[in-house]
Image (cartoon, grey):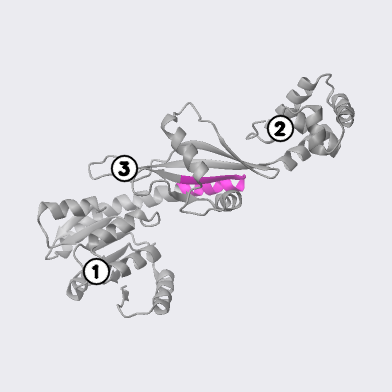
């Protein structure tokens, strides 16, 4: 199957074509290849050979069209002409690698330039391989096969990781992946639906932007993470709700240089929102306290004095003291410390992420 974005096609027609394309791509039965070349004869030769071999073939005749098509269709591999008028292949590759949604796609350069400096430039721009013109379709497909195997493994691992992370949402644990280093430095690479909602509510940001406080916290602690130690958590407050961030692990993803060195690393962060109202309600049910008694006990756990609690709840210290005396009776304790300890243990059973 082939689809060409014609140079004269207007934006509305292009969007319509992209929607139709998205519906018809058959990823289950064939790999999707995007071929980018401004010379129709080169496109024709590659298209026919790839199509006969069972690939789904998309084509673009300019750098701008290539970026649009790659972002919309997310091909499995890209064959990219190095020298094109306007935006050349080197610039196209750099932009593709800078976008989180296309950074993972392997790029094979096609070039008539054989000087070492151009071949190095192709690899430095993000290419995984190159073939020289005139193009030999069998050689191209042999090289594609090697890189597609790696791409398939990466997609499978990403799907499995995504399933595991989405499962966290169901239990109220949202997760995000943030990249440190490389061209994608500081970008939010991946997020669960719950994480998207929480970050928008607490910070007013959305992907690929990572909230500055979160990014600063990650940069401070990422280098000190070990399998046996967890760095300090980050907390954000919004009214009576609190969002905690835990730095879990380096995911193993990220950008890799031509010599196999890591250019960047991706970090998994798990978030959990804690509501003071939910904790107070849980204590009320657990210890059979009135709503006001549970509120008083909650602030005792938080280390507040009777005067502080009175100011928070709009009551006198004497009234707070009477509520606290009834709490002691219901909990079967005699001291403030014992009441706070019992309440803390119960809260952590119900809300393991609570830090007091």
Q: Position of residue 204 (x, y in %)?
A: 57, 53
Question: 120 above or below 277?
Answer: below
Instruction: Find residue 263 and name its label.
Output: 3
Q: CA distance from mark 1 to mark 2?
A: 62 Å
Quick check: is 284 in the magenta stretch? no
- What is the quadrant of residue 243 in the picture? top right
Split into 4 quadrants, where in the image is the C terminus?
A: top right
Q: Earlier in the sequence, mark 1 or mark 3?
A: 1
- What is the quadrant of residue 112 in the picture? bottom left
Residue at image location 15% in from the left, 61% down from the top: 111
**Which residue is at the far left?**
115
Circle 3: is it few (<14), some (14-19), or many (20+) Cα within 10 Å?
some
Instruction: Find residue 216 and name its label.
Output: none
Instruction: Tell me which segment is drawn in magenta.
Output: 161-177
Q: Is residue 7 left or right of residue 271?
A: left
Q: Is residue 325 left or right of residue 162?
A: right
Split into 4 quadrants, where in the image is the N terminus?
A: bottom left
Q: Nearer the viewer, mark 1 or mark 3?
A: 1
Instruction: Find residue 347 and name its label.
Output: 2
Q: Nearer the viewer, mark 1 or mark 2?
A: 1
Q: CA distance from mark 3 to mark 2?
A: 43 Å
Q: Are marks 3 and 2 in contact (CB under 8 Å)?
A: no
């Amino acid at each position: 199957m082939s689809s060409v974005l014609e140079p004269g096609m207007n934006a509305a027609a292009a969007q319509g074509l992209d929607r139709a394309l998205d519906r018809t791509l058959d990823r289950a039965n064939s790999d999707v290849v995007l071929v980018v070349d401004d010379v129709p004869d080169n496109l024709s030769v590659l298209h026919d050979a790839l199509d006969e071999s069972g690939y789904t073939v998309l084509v673009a005749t300019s750098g701008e069209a290539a970026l649009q098509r790659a972002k919309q269709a997310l091909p499995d591999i890209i064959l990219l002409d190095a020298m094109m008028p306007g935006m050349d292949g080197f610039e196209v590759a750099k932009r593709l690698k800078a976008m989180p949604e296309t950074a993972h796609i392997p790029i094979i350069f096609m070039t008539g330039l054989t000087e070492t400096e151009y071949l190095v430039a192709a690899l430095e721009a993000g290419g995984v391989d190159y073939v020289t013109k005139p193009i030999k379709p069998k050689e191209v497909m042999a090289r594609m096969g090697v890189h597609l195997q790696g791409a398939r493994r990466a997609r499978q691992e990403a799907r499995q990781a995504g399933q595991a992370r989405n499962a966290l949402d169901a239990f109220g644990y949202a997760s995000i992946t943030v990249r440190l280093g490389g061209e994608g430095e500081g970008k939010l690479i991946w997020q669960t639906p719950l994480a998207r909602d929480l970050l928008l509510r607490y910070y007013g940001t959305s992907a690929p932007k990572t909230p500055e406080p979160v990014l600063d916290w990650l940069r401070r602690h990422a280098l000190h993470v070990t399998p046996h130690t967890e760095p300090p958590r980050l907390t954000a407050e919004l009214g009576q709700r609190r969002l905690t961030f835990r730095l879990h692990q380096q995911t193993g993803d990220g950008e890799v240089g031509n010599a196999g060195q890591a250019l960047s690393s991706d970090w998994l962060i798990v978030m959990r929102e804690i509501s003071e109202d939910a904790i107070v309600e849980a204590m009320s049910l657990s210890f059979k306290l009135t709503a006001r008694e549970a509120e008083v006990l909650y602030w005792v756990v938080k280390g507040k004095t009777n005067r502080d609690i009175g100011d928070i709840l709009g009551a006198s210290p004497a009234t707070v003291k009477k509520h606290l005396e009834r709490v002691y009776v219901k909990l079967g304790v005699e001291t403030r410390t014992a009441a706070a300890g019992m309440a803390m243990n119960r809260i952590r059973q119900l809300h393991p992420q609570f830090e007091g």
